[in-house]
Amino acid sequence: MGIDDGEGRCAAKVAALFHHFTQTRDNRAMTLAKKQKPPRVKTALRIPEELHREITQAAQLNDRSFNAEVLFRLSQFHTKESLDVLHTENAEIKAVTQEILRLVRTR
């Protein structure tokens, strides 16, 4: 039979329900985690030993995996590059605007 849980159910049924609940919860969490991450591609990369050491040390200091450190550095590079382009475009727009204002004022 089994030990009664005080509500007429045996401990085995309670354990089974608990197991089902935790399995369902864990499966939902895994599904959600999979949905939140973009697809990844596994690749091999040859880099100089010194760079590998530098990234490894930085990853340890930042409490990240080697892969996470590489991804962080790539995203920072991309961001800096994008900002450089924006600053250049902004300077060009400013120069053109100033020239237009100068021409309007001289008329």
Image (cartoon, helix red, strand yellow):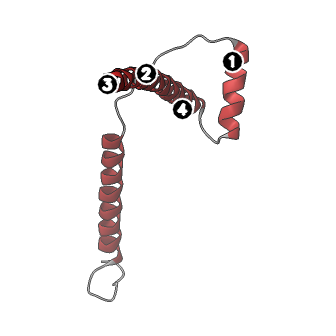
Name the residue tied to disc 1: 51
Of residues 15 and 101, the one drawn nearer to the viewer in this rendering = 101
Q: Nearer the viewer, mark 1 or mark 3?
A: 3
Measured Cα–Cα span from mark 2 to mark 4: 35 Å
Compared across the picture, whether 68 is left or right of 39 comes to right
Q: Are marks 1 and 2 in contact (CB under 8 Å)?
A: no
Q: Residue at x 68, y 28 (%)?
A: 56
Q: x, y (%) of residue 89?
A: 41, 22
Category of crowding for the residue at label 2, using alpha-carbon neighbours closer than 10 angstroms: few (below 14), some (14–19), many (at least 20): few
Label 1 and label 4: CA atoms lie apart by 15 Å
Quarter of the figure with the C terminus: top left
Q: Give the number of the mark in front: 2 or 4.
A: 2
Q: Nearer the viewer, mark 1 or mark 2?
A: 2
Query: In which image quadrant can residue 97 be found?
Result: top left
Q: What amino acid type is highlighted by mark number 3? A: Val
Q: Are marks 2 and 3 in contact (CB under 8 Å)?
A: no
Q: Which mark is residue 104?
A: 3
| Residue linked to disc 2 | 95
Instruction: Report the side of 88 relative to 54 (left or right).
Output: left
Q: Amino acid at mark 4?
A: Phe
**Helix, strand or loop at mark 4:** helix
Q: Are marks 1 and 4 in contact (CB under 8 Å)?
A: no
Q: Position of residue 66 (x, y in %)?
A: 60, 30
Q: Nearer the viewer, residue 70 or 16?
A: 70
* Marks 1 and 2, the one that precedes in the sequence: 1
Which callout, 2 or 4, points at the residue further toward the start of the chain? 4
**Residue highlighted by disc 4:** 72
